[in-house]
Structure formats: C-alpha cells, structure tokens
Amino acid sequence: MNRRLAIVALVLALLGTYFRLAHLDRKVFWLDETHTALWISGLTRDDFLREVAEKPLFTADDLKKYRSLGDTGAGGTVRYLATVVPHHTPLYGVATSLWARAFGDSVAALRALPALVSLLGLPLVYWLAREMFESTSAAWIAVGLFAVSPFHVLYAQEARPYSFWTVATLLSSVALVRAMRLGTW
C-alpha cells in the first residue's frame, strides 16, 4: 500500500511542479507584484509620483524603470524595505534583487524564484508529516495534497514572499515538532 501511495504522491508532486512552473508570464502582473518590482528598482512611490507630476506625458518607457532593476543594487532594495515597508523582511527582497540581476527582471523571471522556492515545501511537508504522525502513509498523503493545493500553487506563482513564508513556517514547524519529540533543543 505504501508503495502505491508513494507513486501517486510522486505523480501529484510532478503535476504540482508543472503547475507551479508553467506559464509564469501569462497571468496578470497584479498590484502586489508591482510592489516587488518597485523594491528591486530601488526607487520609491514618492519618486514615481514626483515624476508623474512633473511630466506632461508619462510613457510606458517611463513606467518601465519602476519595475526594472535599478542601479542601487541589493542595498537599494534593503533601504526601500527599511524605510517604506519595514513590516517586510529583507530576505525575500534581497534574494529577488540578486535573482533579477542573475536572470533578468521579466515577469517570468521574477515569478520563477518563488515558484522554485515553493518546491522546497514538498520535502518539508513530507518531513513534517513524518515527524508528526510517524507514518510514511500520512507523509505521502500530505505531499500529494500540498503539491496540488490550489492555494499553494497560486501563491507559488506570484512575485511575492508567500512561498518563502511557507517554507520558513514548514521548517520551523519541523524543528519544533522534532525538538518536542526528542526532548532537546
């Protein structure tokens, strides 16, 4: 039974991987994702508003610099996050800035990082379920459900830190459950 369950879970994991990575550039780049693009540009909303107010005609090329890599690098991203949105941790912003420098700042490239990070959730879900239930069957079921969960697939495809949070939550949960089971730090 476990072997059949593992095969089904692996097929679902492959399907979930496809769902996460396919057609990243075909969905609308929505408002929250534009904030991520603004983070990596190193420019602020005030810069944008000032430029809009000063120019009689604001073109698509003018707008592009606010969703493209800026000259400020990861330091500009950290400065932006610290001053404008301090409630966001800098890990995702810096990782996205470095990723965009390496792979470009297209919509597909910006969404590829969180999609790939979300794949780390598959083994972490297996590990967590195994720790919690001490059952490989439960672990494989958890992997299958997580892999094709519409919620997790949707958020894995967005240029936002949601998949980073998912992976961090899974990892900290595994650490907590394991520490409780072993009675150690």
Image (spheres, rainbow, N blue to C red):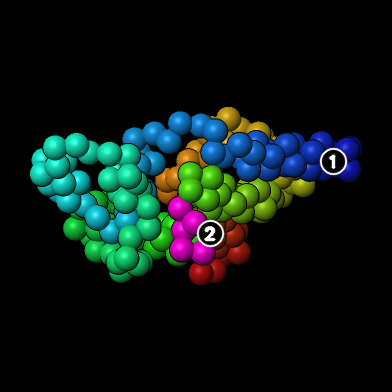
168 left or right of 52? right
Number of residues whose C-alpha sits closer than 10 Å to that of mark 1, classed few (under 14), some (14–19) or many (20 or more): few
Residue contact between numbered discs 2 and 1, judged by CB atoms under 8 Å: no
Q: Which residue is disc 2 drawn over?
A: 103
Residue at point 72%, 41% (across, down): 13
Q: Quadrant of the N terminus?
A: top right
Estimate the x, y position of residue 97 in percent, counting from the top left: 41, 60
SS for callout 2? helix
Q: Which residue is disc 1 drawn over?
A: 7
Estimate the x, y position of residue 59 in percent, counting from the top left: 27, 39
Query: Is 102 contained in the magenta span?
Result: yes
Which one is in front in this view, the residue at disc 2 or the one at disc 1?
Answer: 2
Q: Main secondary structure of the magenta part?
A: helix
SS for callout 1? helix
In the image shown, does 134 or 57 lie closer to the viewer? Answer: 57
- Whether residue 40 is visible: no
> Which of the two discs, 2 and 1, labels the residue nearer the N terminus?
1
47 left or right of 153? left
> Which residue range is magenta in the image?
100-105
Disc number placed over residue 74 in the picture, else none: none
| Identity, as a three-letter code, of the amino acid under mark 2 | Phe
